[in-house]
Image (cartoon, coloured by chain):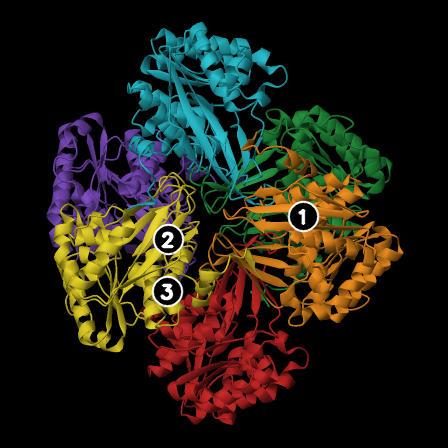
Chain colours: A red, B orange, C green, D cyan, E yellow, F purple
């Protein structure tokens, strides 16, 4: 999507300029993995006009290959972002994305078989399930092709209530379940289990709910790895983040990071990238989950949605105290 | 519409910031008339979100009353503008506007009777006819209400081929004719007569075609005033502009202005405003058409789509040589 | 006044650009009330030159009607603002405003009778009393006209020592008293009572002084409503704000808000607007004073002097915890 | 003075930022002479506040010594500049400068004797004569002190009609004459002779008028050197500039330079600086006047009021054709 | 190299910001060819630090693969660019590049054999010959490897006098000759033949010299294709450009394009790209040379060194008149 | 050096603009002393090109005289600065400075005898010792000349490990000792004593180490005044700073300041300036050390490396609580 952000702390009705960039769950995950030394392509559709060209240039800059980007349709989904300050939250205003190039690309647009054969891991985002039947169908076909070819399916639940509207959980459930049955690594938390999958727990604390429900999800949908985070906003505007990783019937938790926030958007994708990287590199679970949480933390400190740190910088952030200047 | 312009001469794929403003034929005409001392309101629909609020603030800044702006729907039509330079033309890329707030506002949205009673003049733009049946229907009802209440209907033909698609002229003809029958002041040129209305002429020169066809249009559709311009781009990148006014079976032509161009968009609307102002103030035809052409010229020299000059500044530009500094 | 602010944290002697806007107590209050759904006009004088035109455009953007703005004189009062950071305070440098258009507008400039008849509430700012005899006279005549026509006079004491110079309290007292006798809603705190009105108290704590002196003021000058705030700057650079409202011989206090500060200027005017809105809408005192304090808090978080929040956003800020992103 | 310029081509009522700098005739001449290798000081008064500090820093950056700048009073004169484009002239809007620090500095502020003793040349600007009696008195005392100490008095007539108001020429004449009698190098043209000094000529062409009147002025007021320019604005927006130098009863003319203009303000001061430099370095008249005209031309091509070229760059511009890139 | 450009028309001593980008002959040619649908890699060395990372991101954005970029050494060569205006030329100031990463990369840094095998065409720039013996050696080895593997060697003479210093032509000759003997497509003009290669002609006109000398060069060094341009700067600041192509003992000339210039740097590389593209696509000579010249013209109209136009846009620019807006 | 800073919080690989300024230990100390009313010159070498000219203009703006700046060589040392945020440290990337104008200026460049005679105090920075033998030699000759002429030598140890490389402490020791024997005021802390001078202590706490080692250094090298700071970074990102001053066998400590940090670079130089100013003005030690620490604190709150506060502002910061606005 195209992100149109008012610089500084003005509202749209005060300012006259916007900073634009292109992002989205897939872009963020691919870009982060590129920084960790992997190579990857975005499978999507962009219009064959100057806005599409700008998006392609932006993706290339992030190290993402545009080889599987189809160029057709009319426009890119957009959202406006007004930065909050302290007691005033940030505001996101979506412009129409129902007829975007991505959402109107029909069957046969992508060569899923070919792509699946050439890639080890494919990442899917639950937001896409909220779009329309055609897109959902494409997504499931692709996941199936990856599975059939022995690849790893990563699925980030990422349920957005405003996109599903009223009665959304019921509409969404079966689609999510189809994806979960195909997935090898799933990003989710206790809320997804309760609300999207309709599971029950008698626990009241988030941590207990996680420990109660996630093993049940893993078992029911036969998912080898489930990971997620527990975030809290502290009184002094800092955030705290603790990651979990459930694998082989066992939980591992990261240390809890507490930090100031520059830009909140995209931190979850950085966490996902950390988990995927850890799994690909066969890190021990402690290292994987702490690496992912540190990647998430650092992404809160950069401009834009995408992680900009190298593997080394994240490893340093896991252990060391903060320098004020590196020179 | 929301205009998103890349500053300077970069392409969208080079830059990272956009300058935004809100404009459109109606906005430009109203804003210019406000500068000439009239008061006016925009009749339109904007979303009830931060983008809509920004549009309202922008209109107010231009001196336009938002009293008749309905707030509903989801988004504002947008276009991206990349400035050309010399041999390289400017590029306009529209984002989807088919489901904009304006285009999805249904019957009963506006109180046309009430508005018609309270206003002397209402301006309509032919671009609107290209949108959809519902919008076309609203437009014609409004024009009829104005006519019935003794108001003056201004109609700017403004046929945009890309919006009508193939076979557009045939699709458009009857809609244009309905509007023309209702109109008191029409902005058009010889091309509209030939292509939209299907009229024939054996003349080859633009000027001759104008003098052949415009009287025929005025007669057939019983239009008291028809005005338009003849623009040419000179070899040294300056433009030349000459206006005509046809009224009471007689043509009046402005002097021909030659000038450098800063921003081309909106100059036609400034010309329209000049004609409307001249008619309202009962200027003699020579003054009206030269005032309108000078207004058009000055609008080429300012940032954005909208005329920023006072009546006095335009009167000065009609006659005097250019100062280099006013102090 | 025209506010000329160095962007970021540079000093005037480091930078080369300024951000400009137009504000002032009246502008801030009117703009906030416009956001709450009221309509209002500024009664003032601006020069008939490009600076005056810019000021008018800015006011219109804020939703303020310029109908009663007289255009004469030569210039607008200006001040330069250099932002402080942490241990370094912000600096305000006034340019000359003694001969501004506002301060040189003579008797007969404004039609106070007509304006008084058409408006329910008129807001006056004590800073104006510091200007010159002519302006003071105009202000009192206007307040009297409002009173005589049954309107509500709002008076914000706002005593600025630097404008009155040495012996200022004595010079100011009688002028303030004249205004207080005419007022229905007064914004003040215990310092105004002690220093401007020369009242005595044996209490040492601010809160006790307020509770001791404000009822005395209300009684002596027969003021139905008096409101004010108690602000403190905390060690971690956050501010705390608690409002009071004295009405019908009874005090009501808002909850104490603690928050980070982006731009301190104009927060008092937002508080005033909240009180006026609450009184106009006949909110119960608890709601009025907390609404006003929340409006003040939110205005600390926005760019510029003027409140930018809707009634709904303020109501949310009164009760809810902070979201990090609204999407 | 403080120059507050809207960047690009927006009007004050469109933009939100200003670019600021400090200039004035004296500043421009001193800065140019510093670039030619001379050292010089500004004799003026600036407020002892952040705006004054910014002005001092700016002057120092230009290579001007602030040793004789008195720090008192309240503010700096200011003007707003909106850039014109093509058919639309630039607009200068002055803010009040009648009570500026410079204009309110009283007798005894400056140590003219001491300054006169330490400097070879002092430059005076006719605009200053338009301020008030006190400033005029200071100016003449200073010129007299320079004369008495054997220094060279440079006087630039620079009559500004808007500052003298109606009947200005009569009010101004005696003051100008006093200065002329004290001067060694005078910058003027035929209009100054006719309008300010009330001289008569029967010639119609500018060039003839110059050749008729300037020798008469030189004779009457015993002025060793008089110089000036003849500027014309061409149809294609380029300007043409030709300088003259009258010395020892003989005229010398520069070649005529034709060039595009970026910023018109300050070019006259650059010309003055060229004449003064030529005289100080004892250039032959041909070289002096062409050097001055080339300096004037180059100052039209830079941002801001002040010449930024070295002596070498000007010498190159006198003779060579233009390179497109120097590398 | 890193290009550090002062925005607008300020000098380095006036401004405080720089716009940075990364370019160079190779970057420009590769980027242009990527836009024409080819894929290509830069063979170079960049430091393994944040500046190197920024360069890689920039190259990727332009569509250039960083696969053969070695990361070592300490810094990137840099130059400062101050834009000229009219009579004032642009200024380029180089910072030290003698110890840049590229210039200190030793033997064995690059796998020339492997690269040569995988690519059809390799482009070399004569500027590189001016660096040092080690770099010259690497360059010739690479060219030889390409030749030996049947690839096409493109060599742009691009002699820069300031880099070779005094007696440069003699120092340079043998190195240039070695490259010419290895080349298939050579970019040069009559000056290169006369000064670098020491050839003689009795013709006086540039065009005649070209027709006299280029065939001689082609014959002596057995070069299948030689191309170049004839540029002239017109009085109204427009430039005129005419390209030539010498192939199979026959000259072809493009039409002469006349146009306004926004940024002159990189236009020669765009011309080279056009020639290479024409040869790769087997365009007839007329089309190749006009395509190349049009590509050169359009690159004068864009921000930065690199061509930003698609093949289609260039084809349109070859034949059509200019639109003022494309919408 | 030239400081090239990415604005805001972007990385070099995200942004496209840089903010530039010129600084360095000497510049910072001179500039601060100029603000305290002293006059001073920088003794250095800058290239005779536009970058050198920009540096000179910048120094002049800061109030530093360029009289002793030699203009030769090719370039200025540069570094890139990317701002950190919270858990992410700032990054400094040096470009090559080994062949900078300063580092290649040979013997005889500066007239040390003459300069020493005309100045009371000369400040030297230990970073310079890391450059090369020639520069080291020049530095020691200069210090000796100052000593011989009765001036005060200020030496700031400022050991930078990355500049000396492996085995640096041993290489550096003798050079540092030579400077220490010549010095009157030395800036250092316990780490310099231990690592550079190889002294031993059995204490574990920083404060104890200072009290153990500094007197030993003072005695051994016969240094009248030694001063330094103890900085700590707190959990909430604030810093704490406490200064010490050792003089006449006695320690004085400042109060500990705790504050938010805007720009960390240059704070040490501000502290040095405070110590030098206190010594020159014969402040009592308590005042000197607290003045210096407050100067250091305030420099953390400003844009750029150089202190921007007046003596008065620092004196206020020593004692008063913080105002939020000064008006």
Q: CA distance from mark 1 to mark 3?
A: 45 Å
SS at badge 1: helix
- Which residue bears the numbered disc 2? E241
Look at discs 2 and 1 and give the one toward the viewer: 2
Circle 3 crowding by C-alpha within 10 Å: few under 14, some 14–19, many from 20: some
Look at discs 1 and 3 and give the one toward the viewer: 3
- Which residue bears the numbered disc 1? B270
Both labels 3 and 2 in a single chain: yes
- Report the side of D200 relative to E191 (left or right): right
The answer to whether one can see residue D41 in this image is no
Q: Are marks 1 and 3 in contact (CB under 8 Å)?
A: no
Of labels 3 and 2, earlier in sequence is 2
Q: Nearer the viewer, residue C156 or F61?
A: F61
Circle 1 crowding by C-alpha within 10 Å: few under 14, some 14–19, many from 20: many
SS at badge 2: strand
Using the image, name the chain to which the residue with label 1 belongs: B
Q: Residue at x 39, y 72 (%)?
A: E37
- Report the side of C217 relative to F285 (left or right): right
The quadrant of the image that shows the C terminus of chain C is bottom right
Q: Are marks 2 and 1 in contact (CB under 8 Å)?
A: no
- Report the side of C185 relative to E67 (left or right): right
Residue F250 location, quadrant: top left
């Amino acid at each position: 999507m195209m992100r149109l952000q008012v610089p500084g702390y003005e509202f749209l009705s005060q300012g006259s300029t916007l900073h634009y960039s292109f992002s989205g769950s897939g872009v963020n995950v691919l870009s982060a993995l590129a920084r960790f030394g992997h190579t990857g392509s975005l499978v999507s559709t962009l219009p064959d006009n100057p806005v599409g060209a700008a998006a392609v240039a932006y993706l290339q800059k992030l190290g993402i290959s545009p080889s599987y980007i189809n160029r057709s349709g009319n426009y890119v989904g957009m959202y406006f972002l007004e930065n909050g300050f302290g007691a005033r939250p940030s505001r996101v205003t979506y412009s129409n994305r129902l007829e975007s190039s991505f959402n109107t690309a029909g069957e046969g647009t992508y060569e899923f078989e070919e792509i699946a054969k050439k890639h080890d891991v494919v990442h899917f985002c639950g937001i896409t399930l909220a779009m329309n039947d055609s897109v959902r169908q494409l997504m499931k076909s692709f996941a199936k092709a990856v599975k059939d070819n022995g690849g790893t399916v990563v699925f980030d639940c990422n349920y957005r209530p405003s996109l599903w509207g009223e009665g959304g959980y019921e509409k969404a459930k079966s689609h999510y379940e189809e994806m979960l049955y195909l997935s090898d690594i799933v990003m989710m938390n206790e809320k997804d289990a309760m609300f999207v999958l309709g599971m029950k727990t008698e626990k009241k604390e988030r941590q207990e709910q996680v420990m109660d429900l996630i093993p049940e999800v893993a078992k029911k949908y036969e998912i080898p790895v489930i990971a997620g985070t527990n975030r809290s906003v502290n009184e002094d505007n800092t955030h705290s983040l603790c990651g979990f990783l459930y694998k082989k019937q066992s939980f591992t938790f990261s240390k809890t990071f507490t930090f100031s926030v520059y830009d909140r958007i995209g931190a979850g994708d950085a966490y996902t990238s950390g988990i995927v990287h850890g799994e690909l590199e066969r890190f021990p679970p402690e290292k994987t989950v702490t690496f992912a949480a540190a990647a998430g933390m650092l992404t809160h400190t950069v401009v834009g949605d995408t992680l900009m740190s190298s593997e080394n910088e994240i490893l340093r952030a896991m252990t060391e105290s903060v320098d004020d200047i590196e020179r």
